[in-house]
Amino acid sequence: MTIALKGVLFDLDGVITDTAHYHYLAWKKTAESIGIEFDEAFNENLKGVSRMDSLLLILKKDNRENDFTKEELETLAADKNEFYVSLLQEISPADVLPGIKELIAELKMQNLKCAIASVSKNARTVLSALGMEQDFDYIVDAAKITKSKPNPEIFIEATRGLGLTPSEVVGIEDAQAGIEAINAANIVSVGVGSGLRNADMTVKHTGLLDLRILEILHSK
Ligand code: B16
Ligand code: MG
């Protein structure tokens, strides 16, 4: 007997809207303030990784992870966030990625549930700037998530929040760490973008997603 698809778990940054560039600009400013070079290629490693874990990866790149006290680390992370939040003021409903509004409308019409599984503590601010806070049945509180993607914790929590089981949902992600997290939660994974490995299906961009494709993949 096939299990019906009842819900969709969305990553935020890179799936609902493209905030990765703002994260990049903010980390570049913070990294360069302490003499660490930072480029877009390295920024790829930080997608889906929490704020403090991202900072630690940046420091580790230059073997600087033991150069700062806990308080100094907190200050660096807070500085990055302050600049990132100031950049978020640029976001408007026009910045929702192609096809996402249509997909959510289709899911709603068919009574499927939608959740946000983002490790960003700014997720609600971003959704509110996009005019999408009401579009989701459940938004995981990133403050309660103790392990960054690729740990499955956030996708398990999003599924629980919808009142569903892993076999009843699919997860959509643009980051390798996110795909690994979905797979580790025993949820069908959909990758968005290029160069992603191990996703059950990958599409080049969000405009190619629709309910039919998700249902076919889920039923396999
Ligand atoms: P914040 P996602 C992640 O969001 C971003 O991909 C990652 O780059 C960022 O460091 C992380 O959120 C934490 O964000 O500093 O706003 O709490 O991809 O899980 O939606
Ligand atoms: Mg993402």
Image (cartoon, helix red, strand yellow):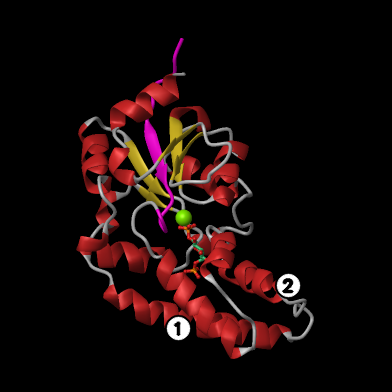
Relative horizontal placement of residue 75, taking residue 115 as reference (left or right): right
In this view of the protein, which residue sits in the foreground, 18 or 152?
18
Dot 2 surroundings within 10 Å: few (below 14), some, or many (20 or more)? few
Label 2 is placed on what type of residue? Lys
In this view of the protein, which residue sits in the foreground, 120 or 161?
120
Name above or below for residue 76 compared with residue 23: below
Relative horizontal placement of residue 76, taking residue 122 as reference (left or right): right
**Residue 82 got which mark?**
1
Disc number lying in front (2 or 1): 2
Residue at point 67% right, 88% down? 72
* Dominant SS in magenta: loop
Q: Label 2 belongs to which residue?
A: 60
Query: x, y (%) of residue 13?
Result: 42, 59
Name above or below for residue 95 compared with residue 6: below
- Give, as a single range, the part of the protein colored magenta: 1-14
Query: x, y (%) of residue 215?
Result: 36, 25
**Dot 1: element:** helix
Query: x, y (%) of residue 209?
Result: 32, 37
Q: Which residue occupies the extreme top position in the image?
A: 1
In this view of the protein, which residue sits in the foreground, 205 or 23?
205
Query: x, y (%) of residue 28?
Result: 52, 79
Dot 1 surroundings within 10 Å: few (below 14), some, or many (20 or more)? few
The Cα–Cα distance between marks 2 and 1, rounded to whole angstroms, is: 22 Å
Name above or below for residue 103 compared with residue 29: above
**Residue 1 got which mark?**
none
Residue 13 colored in magenta in the image: yes
Residue at point 28% right, 70% down? 91
Residue at point 38% right, 26% down? 5
Residue 190 colored in magenta in the image: no
